[in-house]
Amino acid sequence: MNPPFSDGADIKHILHARTFLNPGGLLVAICANGPRQQEALKPIAESWEDLPAGSFKESGTGVNAALLTIKG
Protein backbone atom coordinates (compact mmCIF):
# COMPACT_ATOMS: atom_id res chain seq x y z
CA MET A 1 0.00 0.00 0.00
CA ASN A 2 1.04 3.58 -0.53
CA PRO A 3 -0.91 5.69 1.96
CA PRO A 4 -0.90 9.49 2.13
CA PHE A 5 2.08 10.80 4.11
CA SER A 6 0.84 14.21 5.30
CA ASP A 7 0.60 14.83 9.04
CA GLY A 8 1.39 11.21 9.92
CA ALA A 9 -1.59 9.87 7.96
CA ASP A 10 0.59 6.99 6.78
CA ILE A 11 0.84 5.73 10.36
CA LYS A 12 -2.92 5.76 10.83
CA HIS A 13 -3.58 4.07 7.47
CA ILE A 14 -1.00 1.34 8.03
CA LEU A 15 -2.18 0.59 11.58
CA HIS A 16 -5.76 0.42 10.31
CA ALA A 17 -4.81 -1.86 7.41
CA ARG A 18 -3.03 -4.12 9.90
CA THR A 19 -6.40 -4.88 11.54
CA PHE A 20 -7.51 -6.58 8.30
CA LEU A 21 -4.59 -9.01 8.14
CA ASN A 22 -5.43 -12.67 8.41
CA PRO A 23 -3.09 -14.90 10.41
CA GLY A 24 -0.06 -15.49 8.21
CA GLY A 25 -0.98 -12.54 5.98
CA LEU A 26 1.53 -9.91 4.92
CA LEU A 27 1.10 -6.16 4.68
CA VAL A 28 3.63 -4.37 2.49
CA ALA A 29 3.63 -0.58 2.67
CA ILE A 30 5.61 2.52 1.86
CA CYS A 31 5.72 5.17 4.54
CA ALA A 32 7.55 8.38 5.29
CA ASN A 33 10.86 7.62 6.96
CA GLY A 34 10.61 10.09 9.81
CA PRO A 35 10.89 9.84 13.58
CA ARG A 36 7.12 9.40 14.10
CA GLN A 37 6.97 6.54 11.61
CA GLN A 38 10.08 4.89 13.01
CA GLU A 39 8.66 5.09 16.54
CA ALA A 40 5.17 3.80 15.66
CA LEU A 41 5.84 1.33 12.86
CA LYS A 42 9.40 0.05 13.05
CA PRO A 43 8.78 -1.96 16.28
CA ILE A 44 5.92 -3.91 14.65
CA ALA A 45 7.59 -4.34 11.27
CA GLU A 46 8.92 -7.70 10.15
CA SER A 47 11.25 -5.80 7.85
CA TRP A 48 12.14 -2.14 7.32
CA GLU A 49 14.13 -0.91 4.34
CA ASP A 50 15.23 2.70 4.00
CA LEU A 51 14.63 3.74 0.41
CA PRO A 52 17.24 5.89 -1.36
CA ALA A 53 16.87 9.65 -0.98
CA GLY A 54 14.86 11.08 -3.86
CA SER A 55 13.09 7.80 -4.65
CA PHE A 56 9.87 9.65 -5.48
CA LYS A 57 11.36 12.88 -6.84
CA GLU A 58 9.81 12.23 -10.27
CA SER A 59 6.41 12.13 -8.57
CA GLY A 60 6.98 15.57 -7.09
CA THR A 61 7.97 14.70 -3.53
CA GLY A 62 11.31 14.76 -1.76
CA VAL A 63 10.07 12.92 1.33
CA ASN A 64 12.42 10.22 2.58
CA ALA A 65 10.58 6.91 2.52
CA ALA A 66 10.84 3.37 3.79
CA LEU A 67 9.40 0.05 2.65
CA LEU A 68 8.07 -2.11 5.46
CA THR A 69 6.35 -5.43 5.93
CA ILE A 70 4.09 -6.47 8.79
CA LYS A 71 3.02 -10.09 9.30
CA GLY A 72 -0.46 -11.00 10.46
Image: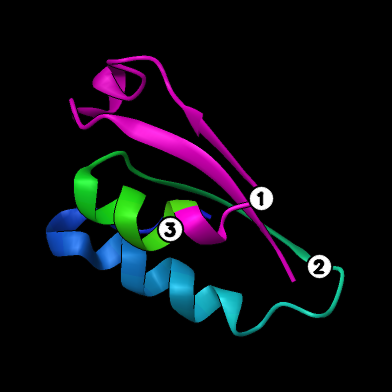
The part of the image, by quadrant, that contains residue 45 is: bottom right
Measured as percent of width and height from the top left, residue 66 is found at 43, 36
| Residue 2 appearing in the image | no
Give the residues drawn in magenta, as a range.
43-72
Label 3: few (<14), some (14–19) or many (≥20) C-alpha neighbours in 10 Å: many
Rendered location of residue 65, percent (x, y): 35, 34
Residue at 34 percent of width and 48 percent of height: 38
Please say whether residue 63 is visible from this viewpoint.
Answer: yes
Q: Are marks 3 and 1 in contact (CB under 8 Å)?
A: no
Disc 1: CA contacts within 10 A as few (<14), some (14-19) or many (>=20): some
Quick check: 8 left or right of 37? left
Type of amino acid under label 2? Gly
Q: In terms of secondary structure, where does tag 2 sit?
A: loop
Amino acid carrying label 3: it is Leu
Question: Farthest residue toward the bottom?
Answer: 19
Is residue 50 part of the magenta span, yes or no?
yes
- The residue drawn where x is 84% and y is 78% is 23
Residue 64 image point, x, y percent: 26, 29
Q: Which of disc 2 and disc 1 is earlier in sequence?
A: 2
Q: CA distance from mark 1 to mark 2?
A: 12 Å
Q: Which mark is residue 41?
A: 3
Q: Nearer the viewer's eye, disc 1 or disc 2?
A: 1
Give the label on residue 28, or none.
none
> Which secondary structure, mark 3?
helix
> Which of the colour schemes (rainbow, by chain, secondary structure, one colour) is used?
rainbow
Badge count: 3
User: Label 1 amino acid?
Assistant: Glu
Residue at the spot of label 1: 46
